[in-house]
Amino acid sequence: MTDAAAVSSTIRRAYEEFLASGAVPETVRSLVGDSWARSLQRGIDPAAGAVEAQAMSDEEFVRYREAHPITAVRPVVQSLMLDDIADSGVVLALTDNVGRLLWVEGEASARDRASRINFIEGSVWSEEVVGTNAPGLALATGRGVQVVGPEHFSSPVQEWSCAAAPVHDPATGHVIGVIDVTGGREVAAPFALAAVRSVVAVVERELKARAVDLSVASTFEAGSQARLTVLADNAYRWQRGGDGANGRSLSRRHAEILLLLQHYPEGLNTEQLALMLADDGIDPVTVRAEISRLRRDLGTDVIESRPYRLTVELSSDVGDLREQISGHGDLVPVIEAIGRGGLLVESNAPGITELFEELREDVRSRVIAEGQVAALRAWTSSVHGRDDLAAWRRFEHRLPVGHPDRALVGGRIRILDRRYGL
């Protein structure tokens, strides 16, 4: 039995034990076990599936879907994901903020299979309706999640796996919907959730670019500027003003909070911040206490509440990297910087991990797309790119015939082919 089959068998036994006793076995992830418990408490039938929304007619649904903000970024999602799921048996879905499937896309045969579990446009896949599933759990927790096979509460869905992440409105910070991929074993792999998170990051940047967010700009006082540096090893620093008199060292937790608030200028509420700082969240009281300490250390005018947001114009070395990646400059220094990593590598906070994954994927995409030999050399020599088969192949393609490095690059490609069985 393969490792994946063994894990699936273990979860299935735990699921059956849970239905029989109502107690969640210790072998089940807490994220999933808590969702099972909520599903059972709500009286959801584990033998049932999703239901079609009855609140609107077909015409009303079409009008609602066309006017929904997530539809505006559908072309971006299609361009980033549809080619990758072609002929894979996987479907791509966009939902609204209550779990209603607005769009379900993919090959016709994949959509036909998905329709057998009522994974169709108009059906509702919230946790409250179907029990544990990735779109519903992403809405319930406000974070990216992956649900594998028998982790689903509904038994008809247990032959499927899914990965989903919420999309936030840049003006309010509220969740407007979810991007989800649903399929078989392909979606059970770790990269599936990473891919969805990367697409969500692009979509949210697109939404932010479209928005005219005057409220954020108005919170920044003229001349009130600060600098955050977090990429040096174990040395996180805050600097306010240009004279060097207001610099101070930061704890890792305070550096994480400031970097997250810079990344989400529209603000984060207590629950969102708690989930971004720890896998299972942290107590809201702890979040409020950390914000209080930050205000004490940095000044009471730095962070506003409801939601928490910065009231100073903050630059950072991470922000500098993002600008370098999005521009057309030399990528070699960027690759060297993310190789060191600093807080991006040292932090276990889910929000920082997601931010790092976005940066790393953006760098990789540019390196492969542009095909600059120096950048390809730096990337494939780095900790992040040394096993990147696509990058090595691009590197080989860019080296002229007879180049002394071609043989070495070809050898690495053969090693990776054998290692991954390609």
Image (cartoon, grey):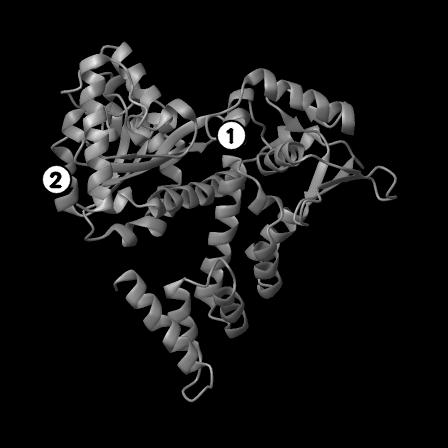
Q: Position of residue 140 (x, y in %)?
A: 38, 22
Residue at x 20%, y 47% (from the top left corner)? 2
Q: Identify the element where label 1 is drawn.
A: loop
> Quick one: quadrant of the N terminus?
top left
Q: Which residue is mark 2?
A: 112
Quadrant in the rendering for residue 148: top left
Quadrant in the rendering for residue 181: top left
Q: Nearer the viewer, mark 1 or mark 2?
A: 1
Residue at x 51%, y 40% (from the top left corner)? 210
Is 339 left or right of 73, judged from the image as shown?
right
Quadrant in the rendering for residue 262: top right
Is 384 left or right of 422, judged from the image as shown?
right
Report the number of numbered marks: 2
Q: Nearer the viewer, residue 40 or 234?
A: 234
Q: Is residue 147 above or below residue 187?
A: above
Q: Nearer the viewer, residue 59 or 347?
A: 347
Q: Nearer the viewer, residue 409 or 131?
A: 409
Q: Position of residue 74 (x, y in %)?
A: 35, 42
Please indicate, yes or no, whether residue 306 appears anywhere in the rendered image: no
Q: Which residue is mark 1?
A: 278
Does label 1 or label 2 sit earlier along the sequence? 2
* Kind of residue at badge 2: Asp
Please indicate, yes or no, whether residue 257 appears anywhere in the rendered image: yes
Residue at x 51%, y 57% (from the top left corner)? 363
Whole-angstrom CA distance, mark 1 to mark 2, is 38 Å
Q: Identify the element where label 2 is drawn.
A: helix
Task: Estimate how packed mark 1 is, as few (under 14), some (14 to 19) or many (20 or more) residues with alpha carbons within 10 Å.
Answer: some
Marks 1/2 in contact by CB < 8 Å: the verdict is no
Q: Is residue 191 above or below residue 52?
A: below
Is 127 left or right of 335, judged from the image as shown?
left
Q: Is residue 76 above or below residue 53?
A: below
* Kind of residue at badge 1: Ala
